[in-house]
């Protein structure tokens, strides 16, 4: 502990040195101070899945197809829902059949496009759950399978459309637009919130 005390005192402060003298059990607290954080263990975060890309497009190593870290993994819950075993999110298996504008999908009032404050996802009872919501852009991108096309998603998600799906994420540069994910072939773009497009609700996370 004397060597640790000396090194820390030279680089940081005598206060840290004094903590080191308290014994080896103080090391986590010392490291936390140096890193500007807490000595408590971090809260576990969800794991992003691999993209699903399997084909090579160049001879250079480093494409998504060259790595297998967190392969996409889903569980069919046999109740109209699918659990993502990487992120821990639960998804509607088939999504919502009808198209809606963003205000309706997100449950946001708009005098022209959602005067009744309809909330498509909140009204869902798929699987017996009542806490469905519109997914964020990143969450929706997480179920794109770039190794598939038309639609670019695992076939466990039945009834999926090779088309645009709304996310809850508003475009920071134009609040009249929101981000969508196209499941053919997995592109992402922002569109005017008045457009009618598909919805797949999610629960958990955030």
Image (spheres, rainbow, N blue to C red):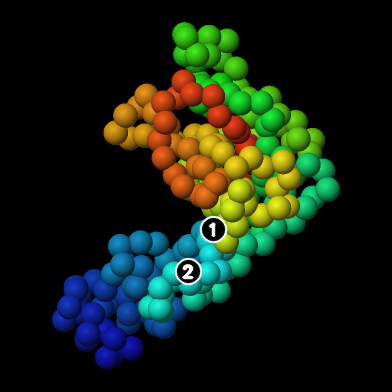
Along the horizontal axis of the image, is 112 left or right of 122?
A: left
Going 68% across and 37% down the picture, which residue do you hit? 95
When the figure is inspected, residue 183 is found, relative to residue 171, above or below; the finding is below
Q: Position of residue 50 (x, y in %)?
A: 54, 64
Q: Disc 1 on helix, strand or loop?
A: loop
Q: Which mark is residue 184?
A: none
Along the horizontal axis of the image, is 165 left or right of 97?
A: left
Q: Please tell me which residue lies in front, 123 or 43.
A: 123
When the figure is inspected, residue 201 is found, relative to residue 110, above or below; the finding is below
Residue at which label 2 appears: 64
Residue at which label 1 appears: 146
Q: 10 Å neighbourhood of mark 1: few (<14), some, or many (≥20)? A: many
Going 67% across and 62% down the picture, which residue do you hit? 73
Please say if the residues under marks 2 and 1 sit with CB atoms less than 8 Å apart.
yes
Q: Position of residue 181 (x, y in %)?
A: 50, 42
Residue placed farthest to the right in the image?
A: 78
């Amino acid at each position: 502990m004397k060597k640790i005390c000396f090194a820390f005192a030279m680089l940081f402060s005598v206060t840290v040195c004094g903590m080191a003298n308290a014994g080896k059990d103080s090391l986590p607290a010392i490291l936390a101070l140096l890193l500007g954080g807490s000595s408590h263990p971090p809260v576990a975060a969800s794991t992003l899945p691999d993209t699903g890309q399997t084909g090579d497009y160049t001879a250079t190593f480093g494409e998504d197809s060259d790595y297998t870290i967190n392969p996409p993994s889903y569980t069919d819950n046999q109740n109209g829902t699918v659990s993502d075993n990487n992120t821990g999110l639960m998804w509607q298996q088939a999504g919502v059949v009808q198209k809606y504008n963003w205000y309706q999908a997100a449950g946001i009032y708009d005098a022209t496009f959602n005067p009744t404050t309809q909330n498509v996802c909140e009204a869902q009872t798929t699987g017996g759950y009542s806490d469905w919501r519109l997914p964020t852009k990143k969450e929706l991108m997480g179920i794109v399978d770039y190794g598939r096309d038309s639609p670019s998603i695992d076939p466990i998600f039945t009834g999926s459309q090779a088309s645009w799906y709304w996310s809850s994420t508003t475009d920071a540069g134009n609040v009249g637009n929101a981000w969508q994910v196209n499941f053919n072939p997995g592109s992402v773009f922002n569109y005017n919130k008045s457009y009618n497009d598909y919805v797949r609700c999610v629960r958990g996370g955030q």
